[in-house]
Image (cartoon, helix red, strand yellow):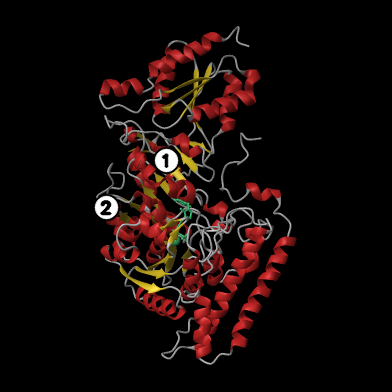
Amino acid sequence: MVKMTYAEAAKLALAEEMRRDPLVWAIGEDLGRGGVFGQYLGLLDEFGPERISDAPISESAIMGASVGAAMAGTRPVVEMRFADFALCAVDELINQAAKARYMLGGQVKVPMVIREPMGMWRSSAAQHSQSLESWYTHIPGLVVAVPSTPADNRGLLKTAIRSDDPVVYLEHKNIWGYQGDVPEDETLIPFGKGRLEKEGDDITIVSWSAQMHIAANAATLLQAEGISAELIDLRTLWPWDRQMVFDSVGKTGRLLITHESVSVGGFGAEIAATVAEQLFSVLKSPITRCAAPRVPISYAPPLEAKIRVSSEQIVEAAKKSVAVSAGFK
Amino acid sequence: MIQPPNQNIDKDWFLEHHIMMHRIRAFEETAARANRDKLVLGAIHLSIGQEAIASGVCKNLMKEDFLLSTHRGHGHTLAKGADPEAMMLELLGRRGGICKGKGGSMHIADASVGMLGANGVVAANINIATGAAHAIKLKRESNISCCIFGDGAINRGPFLEGLNWSGVFNLPVLFVCENNGFASTTRTDAMTSGEGAAPRARSMGITATEVDGNDIVSVDEITREYIANIRNGNGPHLISFNTYRLHGHTASDPASYRPAAEVEAAWKEDPIERCSELLSRLGISREILNEHRKIALEEMDRVYKTAKEAPWPSDDNAFSDVQDVGDPREGAF
Ligand SMILES: Cc1ncc(C[n+]2csc(CCOP(=O)(O)OP(=O)(O)O)c2C)c(N)n1
Ligand SMILES: [Mg+2]
């Protein structure tokens, strides 16, 4: 194992894939100077300006040209700078990239990775903070990845680059500097395989991306109160590891889902509905969601904090769920 | 390999254009018939009156060159070398359709001849064609990319973003604007500030010109010249072809929003008739020229008959070609 940050792990993955396959290239605004979060620092020196390419501030062309470049046999890694700006390229991603393979009856494929740094970070307010992962899960044709650790960021980004389909790759801005162990060998992480962050018997907590760390802290706090939570990091939301969630809920009989994004229409709702459909008879208490209120993200730290789901809130919700046991049904 | 016409007009070359234009027209007329017969269910957009652009541009492209087109893309696709039977099967949504019945008219494509797709979203293909050219450059290949779009498309963002991009990266791409006067039921000039596609392109440093798109000789010449420039590494070029959409926006649009006299006058500029006149002046008999239309109609008749008799695609097609991972039926039923 090697210690590195979430950002360094992604950079390592990209460099490894670019060395392996000359058709892999990265394009986005300000990549030459290392990307706005330093996640491309140094790559220009090794790969040159054609493969670590700056782009005009033309999100629709960044996305659309990458669709064409992918159809024509290269593997673009598209940097969107902030997930929020990808909204300037919705047609290119949703109507073009996601559907071209199907609409053309399999005549073309669109192997591209769309990197979208997301989430709340340092008072960035409503246009630089959003987590829109659930939108993308709604679109047939897209893969949706939401890594939370350096090891996952390396392993998933490599799989994404080798994928023949468009992958919306959501890295969380608040954990660029998060340190963790990364395997020495090139471990690819398959899509649709969750990671068991912590084993437990009393309640299953499902999370992803930066919120997973808040949930992990909650699980530790719960342990101190004698509640043993099992924590699953889904890692990808399409496809998602239903089996891992089913197995865990089968054991604990309780489910809490937590994500940073808005609760209404969030991916937590999909998980809750699926578990309710499939495992109704084993549930000992109602499924709980801990996710954001439906307001734009604020600027002032105390206001921004109001929108975050804290470890303490998760602890409270988990305790409530565990307390229900008898009487439900 | 492409044989450029010689100085004094290569008759054989333009006979081939004449044949192709008639095949496009016959395909479109047959598609219109299929629409009246209620066998084409979705909207189709006919390119009747614009055949010289399709034939003139595509004949100067090689099979390896990429082509991206519009909702009005049957002619371009046919001229790029696609099989009309597989196209008609697609329009009728039948088994053997070129997109397996999943796309229909607005997503007609034949990747085996470099035709990477029509598009249901106006202007979307400008960025995609630019990106295909970007891939060509990265791979150090010698083919080019060509994007055909309508005069309405120049008012969408991708026209600015894609053209700027193609200039910034000096990409091998030919932009072709079909200036047919209309965007759906609206006159394009009423919704366009300034002088249109060519001056806008020039303002971004892209070589651009306007040409009579109903004159096959002009279309062929300018396309050949621009493509040669592009192949020589001189970056993106744009041609705006003036033409007229002789039918409605879709096959079921009577286009009653324009005066009959205007349409009548436009028919006098029919590009096929103008090509026939040229060829007859060059000594080709009217008999031979009329035969081209007859043969084309017979071909498309056969194609239509085959398509009508073909079965629907098998049901499993609804769930294939989505993506490599995940079960598309998950959570549904
Ligand atoms: C983004 C988008 N807006 C609107 C439409 C509806 N629409 C389809 S074709 C068309 C007119 C396009 O005009 P033009 O680009 O001149 O092409 P033409 O139909 O004349 O060939 C419109 C408005 C669409 N398909 N896509
Ligand atoms: Mg038009």
Residue B292: image x %, image y %? 61, 80
The residue tagged 2 is: A32
Image mark 1: chain? A
Residue that appears at 48% across and 88% down: B10
Is residue B129 depicted above or below A151 in this figure? below
Residue B189: image x %, image y %? 37, 59
Is residue B156 depicted above or below B301 in this figure? above
Label 1 and label 2 in one chain: yes
| Image quarter of residue B306 | bottom right
Disc 2 under 8 Å from ligand 1? The reply is: no
In the displayed image of the protein, which residue is found farthest to the top?
A: A327
Residue that appears at 50% across and 43% down: A143
Q: Residues within 10 Å of mark 1 (few under 14, many from 20)?
A: some
Residue A183 — which label? 1
Q: Amino acid at mark 2?
A: Gly
Is residue A130 depicted above or below A185 in this figure? above
Mark 1 or mark 2: which comes first in sequence? 2
Residue B148: image x %, image y %? 44, 64
Horizontal side, residue B116 vs residue B133: left or right? right
Q: Amino acid at mark 1?
A: Pro
- Contact, CB < 8 Å: mark 1 with mark 2? no
**Spatial CA span between label 1 and label 2:** 28 Å
